[in-house]
Amino acid sequence: MKLIQRLVPIACLAFAALSAIAVDVTAQSAAIFDEASGRMLWSKNAEVLKYPASTTKILTALLLIERCRPEEIIVAPKDIETVTDSSMHLRPGERISAREILYGILLRSANDACHAVAVHISGSDKEFAKLMNERAKQIGCRNPHFHNPHGLNDKEHMVSARDLGLIACEAMKYPEFREVVKQRKHCVVRSTNLEDRWMINHNKALWHDPTTDGVKTGYTVPAGRCFVGSAMRNGYRLITVIMNSQDWQADHFMMLRWAFANYSLEKVIEKGTVVGKAPIKSGESRTVPAVIAGGLKVALTNDKSNALSQHVSYFDGMKAPIKEGDKIGVWSISDGKGWTRTINLVAGANVDRLTIAQRARRGIWPYVWGLAGLFAARWVYLQRVRGRRKYSYARYR
């Protein structure tokens, strides 16, 4: 029994060590993200800028969804046939809806479709690239360098695995995006070139793993094999980012096995939780309950050894009246490694403004109590003096 008791801690340490080194990928850069929170769970050279190839199209598709209605018609520009490599063979003047061209971008990885979208939204690839970089920074990317909408090789067109993962997490929030990237094939509706309508997904992981539901492959000679993947297991989704890999499918499945084995989705805070009291000026109450406006779940290690810190901040100088549900501050959580999530704090009750009479009474009472305290102190002092005098008189009498 004593031997077993000694071996158990050693076995636990060995298992922990195995878990820590279990991700051995061929990719030059890689990362794993908890999709719901955007937290990076593991990484390899995740901050190094790399050529993203066609994984660029994740951001192009995101902007298409955000900027265009599904039924909005996109007209292929006159120079559409000059766009090289992977293509859905759009012809000048061809009309196609935003919904249908999305399949061309994400399944067939059509460069001409990306060019058509860029011209439709911004007038040119160059102007669209500016929009891409602006949106990437809004998402939280630190160093995006997008120079075109499709990912064809450009020495200036680079992004890190970290930033690419954040973009994928943002895109997967949209049902339209999720619906497209999980499809193995789709027959598009188009106005011309009707013999070329089937879009086949390049993501072969969809055929090998029923939990994989996205996202996008990419390849150029300088970029190597790239892949941004998604898989839903145990009630939550992980995002994998693989850049310049010898075997992107093997890397993807290894990363998933490790992450799902070592992490589980945990509720960090619930909607409606009261986290403090916010100070209010000129109100019937001097404070108001601060309530979390939305819940948060985060993928945490199974051994619960997660160093997450929470912080509450209220808006300065808040004055009554305050209505229940008004935004009064923010609650934030961070892991000390660059990941932070914030949730609004709202008032948990109504706080009415003080009337003139109430203000007067509230303004007078501090002085009243102050004077009362002075008189009380004076009275105690006099009693002590009188007591000493009586004692001295009795002693020397």
Image: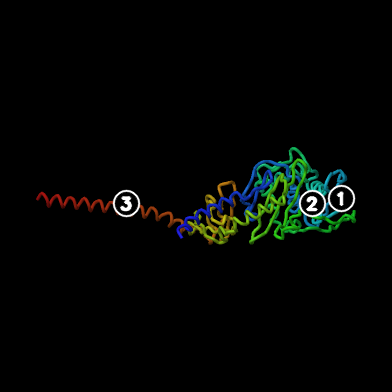
Q: Is residue 350 above or below residue 127?
A: below
Dot 3 corresponds to which residue?
374
Q: Is residue 135 something that shows in the picture?
A: no
| Amino acid type assigned to the residue bearing label 2 in the image | Ile
Residue in the picture at 53% in, 49% down: 316
* The furthest residue to the top: 155
Dot 1 corresponds to which residue?
90
| Amino acid type assigned to the residue bearing label 3 in the image | Leu
N-terminal of the two: label 2 or label 1? 1
- Check contact, mark 3 vs mark 1: CB within 8 A: no
**Image mark for residue 228:** none
**What x and y, as percent, mark residue 313?**
53, 51
N-terminal of the two: label 2 or label 3? 2
Q: Is residue 110 something that shows in the picture?
A: yes
Dot 2 corresponds to which residue?
105
**What x and y, as percent, mark residue 232?**
67, 59
The quarter holding residue 82 reads top right
Front residue of 113/250: it is 250
